[in-house]
Image (cartoon, rainbow, N blue to C red):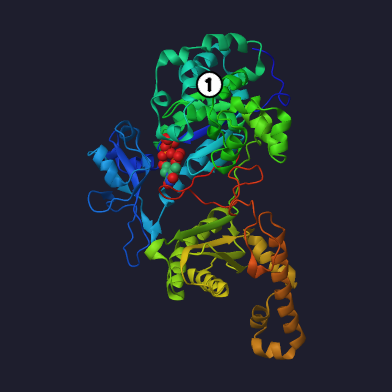
């Protein structure tokens, strides 16, 4: 094994994608589903007064409207059930399919059991990784450089080679290259080649890889990384009961690409020399960041379909057409490490948000209806706010309400909120209602959103206030001295004014800070709108390098646009 020179070598990056995740979570809760064709459906919610369906309730749907499918077990996929189907359609193609409905709370889908399961996976992975970056409810990028180096130092090369080759597909094997040719949507369905487990295929190419790795420290570290990923996957399964697929490479883009080649419960190693082979015929939409409008624009601008074809376009042409993103695009198509950022360690969410759409007859027509649904959104948001307080000792300082009207007009209003550690749903609701009233238009609301953002540490929220005012609040200080607050106020009218001025200044500062945030155009507090090109803005290119996940929004319901942020 060649000597290791850490620092000069690229990192060892893994990517973990849980298999049919919502189904797996339901199976862990209800073993009757194990091995059976089953799917998770989301039933249209949004009717007032409908009782909640708690996680522990019987959520199997056997008749009546069955909702739309959002997760499909591999057994059901093999029988023709796909995510685009309604529950009724799935029953037609596979009468024995079991449909489990997503729990509901506060009048909408309640994804908490899935989020909790995803968090448990991240916690487990974090115990052995240098960094864990949650990419979605069921995907995690991991930096396993340290763990790989540890294995290289503590286990014999032959042992590592044997363990890696017995569990890992090579990304340039014939089977992998074939699997890479299918489109993104086909890959999502779990196609035949992706699901193949031919062990002779696994062996294909490994002898050569191990021989070459003898003089290639980058390859050796990645091979050790494959063993780390194998062990982590085993640990996730034995501890939490979920299977997952894995990828290993020198960056997040390639690791994710490798991970998607063979599912479920398999893993793939993408060594640097394999990248050009794999990328040559790879449909562009399989690359992170190119699955949406931007990928479409690239394809039609140059008349290309695959990463290999894009690389044939003269470089100056690409840079001319896409001055901002051209370099990144070419690096991405070439599988170059520069196209991906380093794995970012566990980030705390920047905001808590939820929302609900009301299409057609369901659109909201009165302030009373808006208030009702703000109340429902508040209930869920309050629960998540309490989790932030408990888990991370953080509290939000801004509340925002956003409304989309049926003429597609989008209004947002926000204002500061002080919840501290014991904020109540009522506090959130009152502030939300005040924002909604400032928005004015309440007729024909087709979507309503509520978010809490600008998270600050709890101690900072109280410390900054006392520091700001330099003493305790009027009421508290007076109480300690046994004075009536009014008397104190009477005695010190100037101070009362000063206090008011301080509050006004604090609000100004907050607004100023918000205006500095990328993605928000500079405008008065009451008029915040997402800037063009921001993640939440309209008409922005999905996957442009400037866009980064800002909230903790999880995947939405059936058919929801699941646009990836670039890795
Ligand atoms: P995916 O990772 O896309 O799919 P999956 O885990 O169900 O299946 P696979 O084994 O092919 O990776 O999505 C993860 C979960 O996110 C999925 O189980 C359900 C949820 N989801 C939605 O709610 N709506 C959607 O449109 C999609 C794509 C996923």
Quadrant, the C terminus: top right
Horizontal relation, residue 435 to residue 194: left or right: right
Percent across and percent down for residue 67 are 32, 51
Percent across and percent down for residue 249 are 59, 26
**560 and 299: which is toward the camera:** 299
Q: Which residue is labeled 1 in the image?
A: 171
Horizontal relation, residue 255 to residue 45: left or right: right
Please report the residue visible at 27 percent of the width from the left and 51 percent of the height from the top: 58
Please report the residue visible at 52 percent of the width from the left and 41 percent of the height from the top: 123
Please report the residue visible at 43 percent of the width from the left and 68 percent of the height from the top: 364
Quadrant, the N terminus: top right
**411 and 102: which is toward the camera:** 411
Percent across and percent down for residue 332 are 63, 31
On screen, residue 423 above or below 338:
below
Q: Secondary structure at mark 1?
A: loop
Q: Quadrant of ligand 1?
A: top left
Horizontal relation, residue 323 to residue 213: left or right: right
Q: How many marks?
A: 1
Q: Is residue 420 visible?
A: no
Q: Is residue 261 visible?
A: yes
């Amino acid at each position: 094994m060649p000597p290791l020179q850490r620092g000069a070598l690229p990192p060892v990056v893994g990517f973990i994608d849980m298999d049919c995740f919502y189904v797996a979570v339901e199976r862990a809760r209800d073993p009757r589903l194990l091995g059976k064709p089953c799917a998770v459906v989301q039933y249209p919610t949004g009717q007032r007064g409908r009782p909640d369906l708690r996680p522990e309730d019987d959520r199997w749907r056997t008749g009546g409207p069955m909702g739309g499918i959002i997760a499909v077990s591999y057994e059901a996929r093999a029988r023709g059930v796909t995510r685009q189907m309604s529950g009724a359609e799935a029953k037609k193609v596979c009468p024995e399919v079991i449909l489990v409905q997503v729990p509901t709370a506060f009048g909408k889908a309640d994804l908490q059991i899935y989020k909790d399961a995803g968090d448990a996976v991240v916690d487990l992975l974090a115990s052995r990784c240098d960094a864990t970056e949650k990419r979605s409810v069921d995907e995690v990028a991991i930096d396993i450089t340290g763990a790989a180096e540890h294995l290289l130092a503590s286990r014999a090369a032959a042992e590592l080679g044997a363990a890696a080759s017995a569990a890992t597909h090579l990304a340039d094997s014939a089977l992998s290259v074939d699997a890479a040719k299918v489109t993104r949507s086909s890959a999502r369905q779990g196609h035949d080649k992706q699901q193949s487990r031919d062990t002779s295929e696994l062996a294909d190419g490994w002898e050569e890889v191990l021989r070459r790795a003898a003089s290639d420290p980058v390859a050796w570290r990645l091979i050790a990384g494959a063993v780390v990923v194998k062990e982590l996957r085993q640990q996730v399964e034995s501890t939490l009961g979920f299977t997952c697929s894995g990828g290993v490479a020198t960056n997040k883009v390639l690791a994710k690409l490798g991970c998607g080649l063979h599912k479920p419960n398999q893993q793939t190693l993408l060594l640097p020399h394999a990248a050009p082979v794999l990328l040559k015929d790879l449909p562009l939409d399989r690359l992170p960041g190119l699955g949406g409008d931007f990928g479409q624009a690239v394809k039609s601008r140059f008349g290309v379909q695959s990463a290999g074809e894009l690389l044939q376009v003269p470089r100056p042409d690409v840079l001319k057409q896409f001055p901002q993103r051209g370099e990144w695009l070419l690096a991405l198509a070439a599988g170059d490490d520069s196209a991906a950022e380093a794995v970012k360690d566990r980030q705390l969410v920047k905001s808590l948000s939820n929302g609900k759409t009301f299409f057609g007859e369901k659109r909201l027509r009165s302030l009373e209806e808006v208030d009702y649904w703000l109340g429902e959104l508040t209930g869920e948001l309050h629960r998540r706010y309490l989790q932030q307080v408990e888990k991370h000792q953080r509290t939000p300082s801004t509340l925002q309400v956003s409304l989309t009207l049926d003429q597609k007009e989008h209004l947002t209003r926000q204002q500061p909120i002080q919840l501290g550690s014991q904020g109540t749903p009522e506090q959130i609701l009152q502030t939300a209602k005040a924002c909604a009233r400032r928005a004015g238009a309440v007729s024909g609301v087709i979507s309503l959103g509520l978010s809490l953002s600008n998270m600050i540490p709890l101690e900072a929220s109280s410390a900054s206030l006392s520091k700001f005012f330099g003493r305790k609040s009027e009421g508290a200080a007076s109480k300690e001295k046994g004075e009536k607050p009014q008397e104190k106020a009477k005695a010190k009218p100037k101070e009362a004014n000063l206090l008011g001025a301080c509050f006004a200044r604090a609000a100004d500062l907050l607004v100023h800070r918000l205006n500095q945030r990328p993605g928000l155009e500079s405008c008065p507090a009451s008029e915040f709108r997402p800037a063009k090109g921001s993640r939440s803005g309209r008409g922005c290119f999905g996957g442009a390098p400037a866009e980064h996940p800002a909230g903790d929004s999880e995947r939405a319901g059936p058919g929801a646009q699941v646009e990836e942020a670039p890795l």
